[in-house]
Image: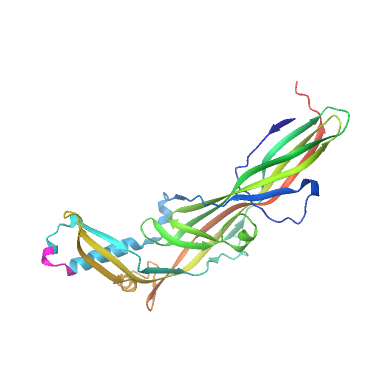
Amino acid sequence: MGETAVVAEGLGCVKPQSNALPNDMLPIAQRVKNEPLLSTNSTNKDLHSNLVDLEEIVMNWSRVVFNATKSKQEAKIKKKYLSFNINWTKLFQESMEPDYSPGVDKTLTKRMPQEEKVLFKTTFTNTTQREQEYSFKTERTTRSTSTVIVEKGVCRGVQMELKLKTPCEVVEAGAGFAQEVSLNHIGENSVEEELTWGVDSCVRVPPNSETCAELVVLEEQMVRNFSIRNTLFGKVLVTVTNLKENNSLITILEGNIVDIIRGMGDHGAKGFTLDGHTVLYDTKGQCIFRYGVEQKVKINEMAIRSYK
């Protein structure tokens, strides 16, 4: 019996199947780990051109306020020794349910053709004159991945604080994804989930024959555009210190986020809308999910091959 294993480069997950295999060949799929492996790619400057940096806005505001209110003694401190540190703990952000692009618009919603990934392949050779029975038992691990790219929105330096609810059809596929995807950085945010696919069955091989058994997973990739309405409210605190004097405190500035945004002459062009004591803005982007949708066991019989 020769045996080779081919581990798929794609991803896998478990989903109930309508066409069940015979009882002696039912595959077993089991999630073994659900620990997000976060990776971020923030090298694409084009993706960041439509992101508004709230940290930069608050920094500019704090410098303007400090210059307008500083005392004569504070005015003597050279700019290179001034340090501005933002405290965001009094600023709150809320996000609405994501609006995914309609399924009827094929330019916005794309479901790629399914791909077969061979997780394990083995050949049973029977050189006898009687039918032989062999055990076909194996487990292989695959990955489901979700990648989210934010194309428009608000960040704080290189950081973002946003949770994106996973599309219902992806959750229902049983791909191991969490109910929400956390976006912590600008650029691409990717999360991987590990799953185990398995089979435990018997394979009958006719006399003087070979039988090839394969554990196969069908994988699917789905691309969706999304839009989320966000609200900001509360205050920011900016601590100004003197680096030359062992980072000693100079003053603390406090500002309401609505007043800070209102003070920008181009806040509308930046995508901000003011509504009473809140600031509204939209986050837009694209999410890509790749996951397994079905597991199969393929059996192929053939005459014994010559290995000479």
Q: Name the residue rendered at 44%, 57% in the picture.
A: 184
Image position of 308 (left or right of 110): right
Query: Of 148 and 239, which appears nearest the observer?
Result: 239
Q: Position of residue 102 (x, y in %)?
A: 59, 66
Residue furthest to the right in view is: 129
| Rendered image quadrant of residue 69 | bottom left
Q: Which residues are magenta?
A: 69-73
Q: Position of residue 190 (x, y in %)?
A: 50, 52
Query: Of 80 and 194, which appears nearest the observer?
Result: 194
What predominant SS class does the magenta segment belong to? helix
Q: Name the residue rendered at 60%, 57% in the picture.
A: 110
Residue furthest to the bottom in view is: 276
Q: Position of residue 192 (x, y in %)?
A: 54, 50
Query: Of 177 and 222, which appears nearest the observer?
Result: 177
Figure check: 249 above or below 299: below
Number of residue marks:
0
Figure check: 107 above or below 205: below
Quarter of the picture containing the C terminus is top right
- Residue 22 in sight from this viewpoint: no
Q: Position of residue 303 (x, y in %)?
A: 82, 30
Figure check: 124 above or below 90: above
| Rendered image quadrant of residue 124 | top right
Magenta stretch encompasses residue 270: no
